[in-house]
Image: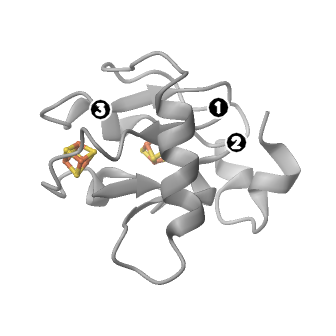
């Protein structure tokens, strides 16, 4: 499965949602998540993210992010159409520790 990681937070470009064939992105205030059980592992969203925030769960140390994506995908509404990125997306892109700093 693929998952959304730290660098989506406070950017939320949403290019990713337009290409997903199974509509498994869910939207919170300042980030998206992928439902890990609905993702069919096609990989087409990964190169679409300008912030490089979408990763395969086969990368090291992804357990925390898989749990994060699963938790919020059960709570947040689905998103299937691109919206404007968050106002500070360009400034926040690439910052470290965004989960602690900006997630709400
Ligand atoms: Fe959707 Fe494919 Fe990305 Fe999974 S890998 S979230 S199915 S576009
Ligand atoms: Fe987030 Fe990248 Fe999608 S910043 S909203 S995962 S395009």
In the image: residue 89, left or right of residue 88: left
Find out whether the residues at labels 1 and 2 contact each other: C-beta distance under 8 Å.
Answer: yes
At 28% from the left and 60% from the top, the residue drawn is 47
The residue that mark 1 highlights is 86
Task: Looking at the image, tell me whether mark 2 or mark 3 is earlier in sequence order.
Answer: 2
At 66% from the left and 66% from the top, the residue drawn is 94
At 48% from the left and 57% from the top, the residue drawn is 66
Judge whether 71 appears above or below 78 on screen: below
Label 3 residue near ligand 1, CB within 8 Å: yes
The residue that mark 3 highlights is 24
- Please tell me how crowded label 2 is: few (under 14), some (14-19), or many (20+) other residues with Cα within 10 Å: many
Label 1, secondary structure: give it: loop
Camera-near label (1 vs 2) is: 2
Instruction: Identify which residue, 104 or 73, lies in the foreground.
Output: 73
Task: Looking at the image, tell me whether mark 3 or mark 1 is earlier in sequence order.
Answer: 3
Label 2, secondary structure: give it: loop
Instruction: Identify which residue, 79 or 94, lies in the foreground.
Output: 79
- Please tell me how crowded label 1 is: few (under 14), some (14-19), or many (20+) other residues with Cα within 10 Å: some
Numbered badge on residue 10:
2
**What distance separates the C-alpha of mark 2 from that of mark 3?**
20 Å
User: What is the x, y in percent for residue 103?
Assistant: 77, 41
**What distance separates the C-alpha of mark 3 from that of mark 1?**
21 Å
Numbered badge on residue 61:
none
Label 3, secondary structure: give it: loop
Quadrant in which the C terminus appears: top right
Among the 4 quarters of the image, the one containing residue 16: top left
Quadrant in which the N terminus appears: bottom left
**What distance separates the C-alpha of mark 1 from that of mark 2?**
6 Å
Camera-near label (2 vs 3) is: 3
């Amino acid at each position: 499965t693929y998952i959304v990681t730290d660098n989506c937070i406070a950017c939320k470009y949403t290019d990713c949602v337009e290409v997903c064939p199974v509509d498994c992105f869910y939207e919170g205030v300042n980030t998206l998540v992928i439902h890990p059980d609905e993702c069919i592992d096609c990989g087409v969203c990964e190169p679409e993210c300008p912030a490089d925030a979408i990763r395969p769960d086969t990368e090291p140390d992804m357990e925390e992010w898989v749990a994060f994506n699963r938790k919020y995908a059960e709570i947040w509404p689905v998103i299937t159409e691109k919206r404007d990125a968050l106002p500070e997306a360009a400034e926040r892109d690439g910052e470290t520790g965004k989960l602690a700093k900006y997630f709400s």
